[in-house]
Image (cartoon, helix red, strand yellow):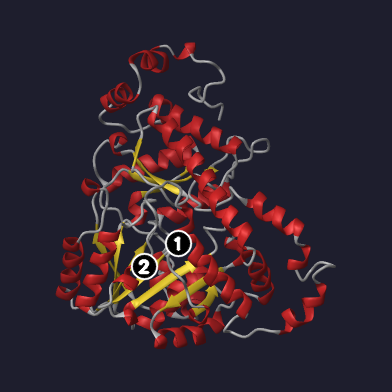
């Protein structure tokens, strides 16, 4: 049977392009899959910097598991719980699991808020949680406002099977991509003019891809806006525990509504998971926490299609119930994320690459606008293809995040070890210092020279640019042999 005939016998959902696999975001992953970097077996391969995965604290969790073999039902010490765990699958979830997750959610928010275990609804990862809320809150054709730039897979998670539309709320670099009331009103007005019914606003806090957190005033603006419009607010807080720079603390939407007695709580919903804060995406632990009883009950019924296995629930409950471990893990994770973030951004600044100031997430927002031959989406894609094919780094272009300003790229920094990080940094630095070798289509070549003079001392500039042979062979500025 030919390909066209096969598609004719499938459903419209199965054959449409709603999964958004044609996005450069996913194309970068495919490039990595075809030619993955390995330090010895494939040193010239593509380094994965498009995956927001937290691998910096696996040793802490592995150490805990080694000290608590009874937490697993697949060990001699834990096998007594095998039968009860294997046969039990209530879609409400194990009470011990819900209590432990609720406790953890409070702890990563500084203990300033508490969460009710009875409002914890589990899902197969944040992907399933987002879709579940979309099904609960909107009908096909309805829309959610989403501040851009935003996570590319929202087009899949929120739209593909639900028929819901997404309307970008345009944010700009001129104010560090902050969400303003004016931008919200403009997006809402455009939807109305297009005869699109807006059912809600979806925000990510901390932001993916920016790595920034929403301040108290902005959160109050969001609550005021959705209350005035009588639409829902979905706060995706899956990076709540990745804030690594203080005194700026993460503020959950749950804190704001505790203070705002006039807020209609039925409009507030939180998405959470353990994929980022704990670095456990393979466990597929997603959470919907809704202040709306009807949404909570409906989403719990829908969770039947994406439950977390009781074996996973049992293990997670054991880990998160160890308050001493949880506290030390949160603190150590913040230290390691801060260290890795500083290394990357400092090394990039040495060769004139700026990044948006951020203090959360597993990535940073890199500014390569000066490397574009012209400020267009086409020029951004041309530059991105060079980075993928010649520099061999999978960084994600801003256009895939619906960013309206060409030249921004998301770079993930927590999904690799220190050795791979050094290789990646050498590739980036060599790419900027020697653009001709990488066939960089730069129109304004003076940008490189000017940026380097601004970011380096005059002596260092001469060493790096004018006399590269003077650099120590162990310096990270030496061209990588890749």
Question: What quarter of the picture does the N terminus occupy?
Answer: bottom right
- At horizontal 75% and vertical 82% (from top left) the residue drawn is 84
| Residue 20 pos. (x, y %) | 41, 64
Mark 1 in CB contact with mark 2 (< 8 angstroms): yes
Residue 231 sits above or below residue 181 on the image: below
Nearer-the-camera pick, 169 or 481: 169
Residue ID at (26%, 54%): 178
Label 2, secondary structure: give it: helix
Q: Is residue 123 left or right of residue 70?
A: left
Disc 1 from disc 2: Cα separation: 9 Å
Residue named by callout 1:
109
Mark 2 surroundings: few (<14), some (14-19) or many (≥20) residues within 10 A? some
Give the quadrant of the C terminus. Answer: top right
Which image quadrant for residue 181?
A: bottom left
Check residue 444 in the rendering and tell me which mark sits there, or answer none.
none
Q: Please, what secondary structure does the residue beneath circle 1 have?
A: loop
Res 243 seen here: yes
Q: How many dots with numbers?
A: 2
Q: Is residue 467 above or below residue 214?
A: above
Q: Which residue is mark 2?
A: 255
Given residues 157 and 147, the one toward you in this image is 147
Q: Is residue 48 visible?
A: no
Q: Position of residue 278 (x, y in %)?
A: 57, 58
In front of the other: 116 or 377: 116
| 10 Å crowding of disc 1: few (<14), some (14-19), many (20+) | some
Which quadrant of the figure has residue 317?
bottom right
Specify whether 80 is left or right of 113: right
**Where is residue 457, by image quadrant?**
top left
Q: Residue at x 60, y 50 (%)?
A: 57
Q: Position of residue 65 (x, y in %)?
A: 72, 59
Q: Which residue is outermost to the right?
A: 76
* Drawn side of residue 78 relative to residue 149, left or right: right
């Amino acid at each position: 049977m030919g390909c066209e005939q096969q598609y004719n016998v499938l459903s419209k959902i199965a054959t449409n392009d709603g999964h958004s696999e044609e996005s450069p975001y996913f194309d970068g992953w495919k490039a990595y899959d075809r030619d993955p970097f390995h330090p010895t077996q494939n040193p010239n391969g593509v380094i994965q910097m498009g995956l927001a995965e937290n691998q910096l604290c696996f040793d802490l969790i592995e150490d805990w598991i080694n000290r608590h073999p009874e937490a697993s039902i697949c060990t001699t010490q834990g096998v007594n719980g095998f039968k009860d765990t294997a046969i039990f699958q209530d879609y409400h979830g194990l009470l011990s699991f819900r209590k432990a997750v609720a406790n953890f959610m409070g702890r990563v928010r500084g203990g300033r808020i508490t969460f009710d275990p009875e409002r914890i609804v589990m899902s197969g990862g944040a992907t399933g949680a987002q879709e579940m809320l979309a099904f609960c809150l909107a009908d096909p054709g309805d829309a959610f406002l989403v501040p851009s730039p935003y996570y590319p897979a929202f087009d899949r998670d929120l739209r593909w099977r639900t028929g819901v539309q997404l309307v970008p709320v345009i944010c700009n670099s001129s104010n560090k991509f902050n969400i303003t009331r004016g931008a919200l009103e403009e997006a809402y007005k455009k939807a109305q003019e297009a005869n699109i019914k807006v059912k809600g606003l979806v925000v990510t806090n901390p932001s993916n891809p920016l790595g920034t957190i929403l301040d108290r005033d902005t959160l109050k603006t969001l609550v005021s806006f959705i209350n005035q419009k009588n639409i829902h607010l979905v706060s995706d807080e899956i990076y709540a525990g990745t804030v690594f720079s203080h005194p700026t603390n993460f503020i959950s939407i749950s804190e704001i509504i505790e203070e705002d007695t006039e807020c209609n709580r039925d409009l507030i919903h939180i998405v959470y998971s353990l994929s980022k804060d704990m670095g456990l995406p393979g466990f597929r632990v997603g959470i919907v926490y809704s202040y709306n009883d009807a949404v909570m009950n409906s989403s719990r019924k829908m969770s039947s299609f994406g439950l977390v296995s009781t074996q996973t629930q049992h293990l997670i409950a054991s880990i998160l119930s160890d308050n001493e471990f949880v506290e030390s893990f949160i603190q150590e994770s913040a230290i390691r994320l801060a260290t890795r973030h500083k290394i990357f951004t400092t090394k990039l600044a040495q060769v004139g690459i700026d990044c948006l100031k951020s203090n959360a997430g597993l990535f940073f927002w890199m500014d390569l606008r000066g490397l574009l031959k012209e400020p267009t989406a086409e020029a951004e894609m041309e530059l991105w293809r060079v980075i993928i094919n010649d520099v061999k780094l999978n960084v994600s272009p801003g256009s895939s995040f619906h960013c309206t300003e060409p030249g921004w790229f998301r770079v993930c920094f927590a999904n690799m070890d220190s050795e791979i990080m050094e290789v990646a940094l050498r590739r980036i630095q060599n790419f900027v210092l020697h653009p001709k070798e990488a066939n960089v289509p730069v129109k304004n070549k003076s940008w490189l020279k000017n940026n380097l003079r601004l970011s380096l001392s005059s002596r260092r500039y001469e060493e790096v640019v004018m006399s590269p042979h003077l650099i120590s062979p162990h310096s990270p500025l030496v061209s990588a042999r890749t």
